[in-house]
Amino acid sequence: MRKFLLILTFLLFACFVLFGLIRNKSANFGTEDTQGVLSDKVTVANSWFPKSENDANLSDVSVGASASILVNYDTGEVLQAKNSSQRLPGASTIKIMTALVALEHAELDDIYAVSANASKIGEDSMGLSEGENLSMEDLLYGLMLLSGNDAAVTLAEGIARSEDAFVAMMNLKSKELGLADTKFINVTGLDVDEEIQFTTAHDLATLARYTWDKYPAFRKIAATDHIFIDANASHKAFDMYNVTNLLTSYPGVKGIKPGFTWEAGYCLVTYAENNNVKLIGVLLNSPDRRGEMTRLLDAGFAKYQVKVEHPQLAL
């Protein structure tokens, strides 16, 4: 009898250990490990999407952009769309995701060092020098106002230790937001030979709305026309003006982000509000992003009986 009880106890203990191992393996399946391997198991965190996947058109406006969308910020109603689910390069508009991931994983007063790699990234630049140390907030101003690729890489390396690891975080967040037609390969939006980076007008509208809604700091930075950051012992002074189209010329425009590469063409994501009507517009590969976004916004506000006067815009 004693021998039987010992055997039974051993079997119960073995089952308990085995159950624990299976449970731990299940709990850890697909999560992020120390090497940055990311899960395919994701909970969609975003509850707002443009309501229609079908192209829609305001009767009095058309655009020459390869893809476009105009959406009511509050309701998700699609007011205008053209090829809105077509996968296209987004150039620097993808820096909206760079900013979002940074804001989710760090604090505005966190300090990051500029590497030689970041300082030499090229193209649009904040003007960072190797060895400088800046706060995340200052880097976000450089990222959003000047589309600084050096700021983007500094944030990525500071937060995730490498750009590749940060890109993995961006792609995971993309899955969480349900951006089914978006893939990131870097944090800048720069074209890379033989590598494909793409998004859609629909996905960018969703990303822009989520980020704008969730982070007051993002709204403040994206709406800033000019900022001067004083020099200190850690870095030189920075005098930055926002390059976002229509920010100072179309009433109610608060940002968000333009972009350009030779492959992507001229792109623009815009948030605007007038008389409590809020709109998000996206243009990808536009021959005239300033003029086309103006026409989209005019028609969108007019749908809600809001007339916007902008005599300073010569179209």
Image (tube, rainbow, N blue to C red):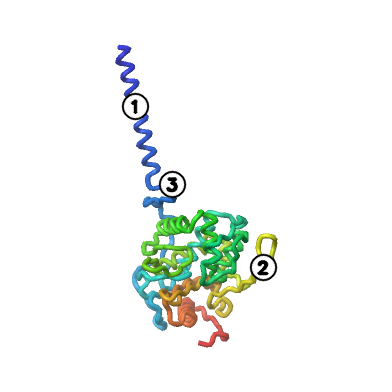
Question: Which image quarter: residue 221?
Answer: bottom right
* Residue under pointer 1: 14
Closer to the eye: label 1 or 2? 2
Q: Nearer the viewer, residue 256 or 60?
A: 256
Tag 1: residue type?
A: Ala
- Badge 1 crowding class, 10 Å Cα cut-off, few under 14, some 14 to 19, many 20 or more, is few
> Is label 3 in contact with label 1 (beta carbons under 8 Å)?
no
State how many labels appear. 3
| Residue 190 percent location from the top left of the image | 45, 69
Q: What is the C-alpha distance between the residues marked 1 and 2?
A: 65 Å
Residue at the far top in the pictured view: 1
Tag 2: residue type?
A: Ala
Q: Nearer the viewer, residue 35 or 184?
A: 35
> Is label 2 in contact with label 3 (beta carbons under 8 Å)?
no
Q: What is the C-alpha distance between the residues marked 2 and 3?
A: 39 Å
Figure quadrant of the N terminus = top left
Work out whether 63 lies above or below 100. below
Tag 3: residue type?
A: Asp
Nearer-N-terminus badge (3/1): 1
- Badge 2 crowding class, 10 Å Cα cut-off, few under 14, some 14 to 19, many 20 or more, is few
| Residue 201 percent location from the top left of the image | 41, 70
Work out whether 43 lies above or below 309. above
Q: Nearer the viewer, residue 59 or 257?
A: 257
Tag 3 secondary structure: loop
* Residue under pointer 3: 33
